[in-house]
Amino acid sequence: MAASLGGAEAPSLLALWADTVSVHALLHDVAAGAFLPVSVRVEEGRYPALSPHRPSAAWFERMIRDLWGHVATGGCDQRSWLDHGRWAHAMPLSPKPEPRTTPPDPPEFLPVEGEDIHQIPVGPVHAGIIEPGHFRFSAQGETILRLEVRLGWLHKGTLGLMRGKSPRAAARFAARLSGDSTVAHSLAFARAAEVATGTEAPPRAAALRAVMAELERVANHLGDCGAIPNDAGYTFLLARCGFHREAMLRAAAAAFGHRLMMDAVVPGGVAADIAPGGTEAILRAIAGIEAELPDLVRVYETHSSLTDRTVGTGILAPELAAAFAAGGYVGRASGRGFDARKLPGYPPYERLSFEVPVLNEGDVDARLRIRFAEITESLRLLRELLLDLPEGAISVPLPLASGEGIGWAEGFRGDIWHWLRLDGGQIGSVFMRDPSWLQWPLLESAIRGNIVADFPLCNKSFNCSYSGVDL
């Protein structure tokens, strides 16, 4: 498996995970447009490391060691990741979890050498109402030389909680991995379960899933399009984008019974049909956004005091975005136009025409512009979907079967991948890969050379999920 990643033209690494006996990787052969699952047997608790060939594997290897106890031989970073030494048992997903008997070790951060370098610790508790995470800055004056992210405070034991459950019961855990992406994670999980059981959701269910996914995308992008300027001290866009985001969330509640549409996507289809009046509520929200969005973009573009903070700040080089297979607005702002709705694709997007915006500047400004462009495309897709909903059933039952499946969906942050193995209709093993696994390390790179005061701006322009990585 490690040998397959050697060379510049080798496949990209999308995910790396494990079960009790093997380590699995999902690769993307960009030239061939193929997606390749690869597995290697764990021998005496060890497997060949991928991180020397693909640095994006390092966090995954640390996670695998914490959860399953498998050690990546030759890995670039052998420190713990999710396990801070405070769990009751080490290696909780291994066949024999070990009781914790020693106090936790202090965290270890990478050294930085040079004149007049100081460290700035931030978090895990922050001033805002946000998820917990620790940021360790090494700075020279106000210039950031290194950022190291430390997560794990939101570890919920999700993978272990899903084992032994039916796909329908386990879907509730997938829906709560990262709450702002509940539809996208539910969709990826449902598709994995459907592949494993040889089931296909009805056309109407596929269309309703797409409606929910685009609603989620628009609501989250609107939130970011207000929050990013707010971190530069400009509150007008926060107020107006927040107004339209609220309208979209209320429309989602009217149509699907929940503002975030949690538990609305289930294996086999959707939990309920769109409510009477739901279509009209969504169309009204769309009309309101479309009427003001061009003016909001113009306001952003013509306020030089705002663009002075975003243009040229937090640049992610296209080469690095490609090397880490960065998805969503992070990748598309740095030249990587990957979108799981188009490739590999899934219903109903194969019958829909839409543009995937791509820029090459890779800065905060580009990531914000990608969001504005995606809002426009998603609003058009929503109208097209709602005015041409297929008739028919909204779900089908899943048979009690054994098998494996990989499912994917394009969330607002980027491509989401779920894998599961069913044994007699019950989950034997499962893994869920949020886009943020590959985006957090890129934030560490993009912030180098910027000043400390610009970190909130860069951080929000990435808007990585803490919970989605903490599992």
Image (cartoon, helix red, strand yellow):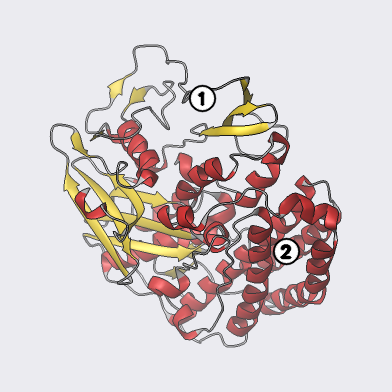
Tell me which corner region of the image, top left, top right, bottom left or bottom right, holds residue 347: bottom left
Vertical position of residue 180 compared to residue 98: above or below: below
- Residue drawn at point x = 44 percent, y = 70 percent: 269
Residue 112 numbered tag: 1
Q: With 353 as the anchor, is 226 left or right in this view?
A: right
Farthest top residue in view: 102
First-in-chain label (2 vs 1):
1
**SS type, badge 1:** loop
- Residue drawn at point x = 25 percent, y = 50 percent: 24
Q: CA distance from mark 2 to mark 1?
A: 48 Å
Q: Quadrant of the C terminus?
A: top left
Q: Position of residue 96 (x, y in %)?
A: 22, 28
Tell me which corner region of the image, top left, top right, bottom left or bottom right, holds residue 125: top right
Depth check, front residue: 206 or 4: 4
Depth check, front residue: 113 or 262: 113
Q: Amino acid at mark 2?
A: Arg
Vertical position of residue 282 compared to residue 361: above or below: below
Residue 223 numbered tag: none
- Residue drawn at point x = 66 percent, y = 70 percent: 373
Mark 2 vs mark 1, foreground winner is: 1
Residue 250 numbered tag: 2
- Residue drawn at point x = 53 percent, y = 43 percent: 445
